[in-house]
Image (cartoon, coloured by chain):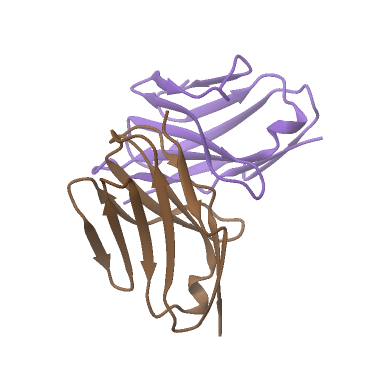
C-alpha cells in the first residue's frame, strides 16, 4: 500500500522557536497519526486525526502542540515553542484498509 | 490505559538459529497486535500482525502467536539471516486506535 511522505527530513531549530512538520498523503487518506521517538527509545503516540478533527491525544500532546490539515491535503504538526526535550524523530502514520498503521519516513527534529 | 512490556531488550543469535521475542499487554480490550522492524535511522516497518480472533499467524520465516488468556504475544523468526538484524517493536491497540509500543528488542544475527 502507498505510504505517506514527510517533510523536512531533518529540522534544526533554536529552543523557543516554532516548527511545523508536514505529512503528505499519496492518496486521499482520512485517518492519520503522529508519533515521536526519542533517540534509542520506544515509539510514543502523540495524536490521531480523522476527517479534519483530533480523535485522540496523549499526555505528551500538550498546549504546545497542534495539528491541522490546512489545505485539505498536507497534514501538519506544529510545536509552538520548542524545548530541548522535543528533540526526536517524528513519524506520521496512516491507517490502512485493515486498520494497520503504515509509517512515513519521519522528520528528525533537533532543538539546540 | 494499555501498557506493553517486551523482552528481551537485546538478543544475539547465530545465523540460521531461531529468535523469539515476547510481549505482554495489560488491557484485555486490545484486539490488534502488530510487530514492527526498525533499521537504524529508518521508519518502523510493519512486518506481521495478529488479531484477537486468531491464535497464530505465519508469513514465511516469521510467525506470531497470541495467548489472550495470558495476555501474551510473541514473534518467532526462524532461519535468521544477517539482514534480520534490527530493532523489533511489538504494539497493542484497539482496532484503529493509538498503538502502544513495547520498549523494543535489538536483534543481532551473527554470520
In the rendered image, residue B19, in percent from the top left (x then y), is placed at: 44, 71
Q: Which chain is brown?
A: B
> Residue at the top extreme?
A63
Taking A84 as reference, is A109 left or right?
A: left
In the rendered image, residue B40, in percent from the top left (x then y), is placed at: 60, 60
In the rendered image, residue A90, in percent from the top left (x then y), is placed at: 58, 39
| Residue under the image location 65 percent in, 42 percent down | A38
Q: Name the image quarter holding residue A81.
A: top right
| Residue under the image location 38 percent in, 39 percent down | A94
In the rendered image, residue B9, in percent from the top left (x then y), is placed at: 57, 58
In this rendered view, identify the residue nearer to me: A66 or B57.
Answer: B57
How many numbered discs, if any? 0
Q: Which chain is purple?
A: A
| Residue under the image location 25 percent in, 66 percent down | B58
In this rendered view, identify the residue nearer to me: B89 or A87.
Answer: B89
Where is B12 relative to A3, above or below? below
> Residue at the front extreme?
B70
Taking A6 as reference, is A11 left or right?
A: right
Where is B76 relative to B92, above or below? below
> Residue at the left extreme?
B53
| Residue under the image location 21 percent in, 55 percent down | B55
In this rendered view, identify the residue nearer to me: A29 or B42.
Answer: B42
Quadrant including the C terminus of chain B: bottom right
Taking A17 as reference, is B23 left or right?
A: left
Quadrant including the N terminus of chain B: top left
Amino acid at each position: 500500500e502507498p505510504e505517506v511522505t514527510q517533510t523536512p527530513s531533518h529540522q534544526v531549530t533554536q529552543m523557543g522557536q516554532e516548527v511545523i512538520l508536514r505529512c503528505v498523503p499519496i492518496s486521499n487518506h482520512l485517518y492519520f497519526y503522529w508519533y515521536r521517538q526519542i533517540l534509542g527509545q520506544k515509539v510514543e503516540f502523540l495524536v490521531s486525526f480523522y476527517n479534519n478533527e483530533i480523535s485522540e491525544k496523549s499526555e505528551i500532546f500538550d498546549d504546545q502542540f497542534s495539528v491541522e490539515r490546512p489545505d485539505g491535503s498536507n497534514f501538519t504538526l506544529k510545536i509552538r515553542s520548542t524545548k530541548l526535550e522535543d528533540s526526536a524523530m517524528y513519524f506520521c502514520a496512516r491507517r490502512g484498509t485493515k486498520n494497520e498503521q503504515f509509517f512515513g519516513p519521519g522528520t528528525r527534529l533537533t532543538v539546540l | 490505559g494499555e501498557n506493553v512490556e517486551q523482552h528481551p531488550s537485546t538478543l544475539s543469535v547465530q545465523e540460521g538459529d531461531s529468535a523469539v521475542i515476547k510481549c505482554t499487554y495489560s488491557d484485555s480490550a486490545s484486539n490488534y497486535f502488530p510487530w514492527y522492524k526498525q533499521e537504524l535511522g529508518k521508519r518502523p516497518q510493519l512486518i506481521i500482525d495478529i488479531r484477537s480472533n486468531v491464535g497464530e499467524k505465519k508469513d514465511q520465516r516469521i510467525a506470531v502467536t497470541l495467548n489472550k488468556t495470558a495476555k501474551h504475544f510473541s514473534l518467532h523468526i526462524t532461519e535468521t539471516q544477517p539482514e534480520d538484524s534490527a530493532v523489533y517493536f511489538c504494539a497493542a491497540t484497539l482496532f484503529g486506535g493509538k498503538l502502544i509500543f513495547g520498549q523494543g528488542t535489538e536483534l543481532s544475527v551473527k554470520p
